[in-house]
């Protein structure tokens, strides 16, 4: 079992430490945790969250992510050079990075796609915050499941099927612009000098 990255998650007012691993098994002592208990459910949800995050678009470029009960936060690297400085061993090219984060429209598309994907895949998730610092601006998405369901005029939980088929969400430019205007906040960042 090879460790991919380190993660911490919050269960019952305490932090627990875990690792994303290449094989898809989660091991814990079954005699200590009762099936169906709150702690068992929290561990299961954190595993499902980590698995969904690793399958997202642009998941290589995530700086960190957190899950607190039904609220998730995901933060991306601000630029390709910062990403390479902290991940020199990962074979990702600048073209791959720019494929998702080169322009403002691509950032909006990524935010919409990630929010739809996570709310579709994770029925326990109720709130989502995604921060993407890019080109001197911070793009922040803070949305609830109910708000996104109303915006899209559907229930994303109903879109999930048991076969894990690839899901394609099609939208027009007007819908993307409406989503960005309603849920995405753009803030100018100050440059920090060391």
Image (spheres, grey):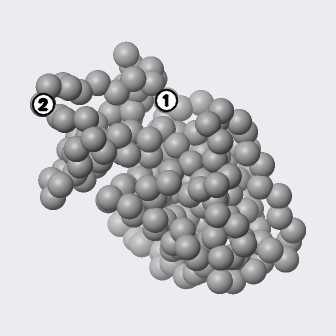
Q: Is 132 situated left or right of 104 in this image?
A: left
Q: Nearer the viewer, residue 127 or 191?
A: 127
Quadrant including the N terminus: top left
Which residue extends farthest top? 1
The part of the image, by quadrant, that contains residue 179 is: bottom right
Total numbered labels: 2
Q: Residue at horizontal 25%, vertical 35%?
A: 35
Which residue extends farthest front? 36
Q: Residue at horizontal 44%, vertical 41%?
A: 48
Residue 28 point in image, percent of width and height: 23, 27
Q: Residue at horizontal 44%, vertical 46%?
A: 49
Relative to 137, residue 70 above or below = above
The part of the image, by quadrant, that contains residue 104 is: bottom right
Q: Is 173 situated left or right of 33 in this image?
A: right
The part of the image, by quadrant, that contains residue 13 is: bottom left
Image mark for residue 98: none
| Mark 1 vs mark 2, CA separation in Å | 38 Å
**SS at mark 2 in the image:** loop
Q: Nearer the viewer, residue 123 or 170?
A: 123
Q: Residue at horizontal 30%, vertical 45%?
A: 41
Relative to 169, residue 36 above or below = above
Residue placed under numbered mark 2 in the picture: 32
**SS at mark 1 in the image:** loop
Residue placed under numbered mark 1 in the picture: 89
Residue density around tag 2, few if under 14, some if 14–19, many if 20 or more, within 10 Å: few
Residue 77 in view of the camera: no
Q: Nearer the viewer, residue 143 or 41?
A: 41
């Amino acid at each position: 079992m090879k460790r991919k990255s380190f993660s911490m998650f919050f269960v019952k007012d305490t932090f627990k430490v875990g690792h994303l691993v290449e094989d898809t098994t989660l091991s814990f002592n079954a005699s200590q945790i009762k099936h169906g208990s709150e702690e068992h459910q929290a561990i299961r949800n954190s595993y499902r969250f980590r698995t969904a995050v690793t399958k997202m678009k642009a998941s290589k470029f995530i700086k960190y992510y957190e899950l607190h009960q039904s609220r998730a936060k995901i933060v991306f690297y601000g630029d390709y050079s910062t990403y390479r400085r902290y991940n020199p061993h990962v074979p990702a090219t600048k073209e791959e990075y720019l494929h998702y984060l080169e322009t403002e429209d691509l950032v909006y598309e990524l935010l919409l796609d990630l929010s739809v994907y996570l709310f579709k895949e994770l029925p326990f998730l109720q709130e989502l915050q995604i921060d993407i610092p890019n080109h001197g601006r911070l793009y922040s998405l803070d949305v609830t499941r109910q708000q996104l369901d109303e915006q899209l005029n559907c229930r994303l939980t109903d879109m999930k099927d048991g076969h894990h088929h690839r899901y394609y969400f099609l939208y027009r430019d007007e819908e993307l612009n409406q989503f960005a205007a309603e849920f995405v906040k753009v803030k100018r960042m100050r440059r920090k000098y060391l």
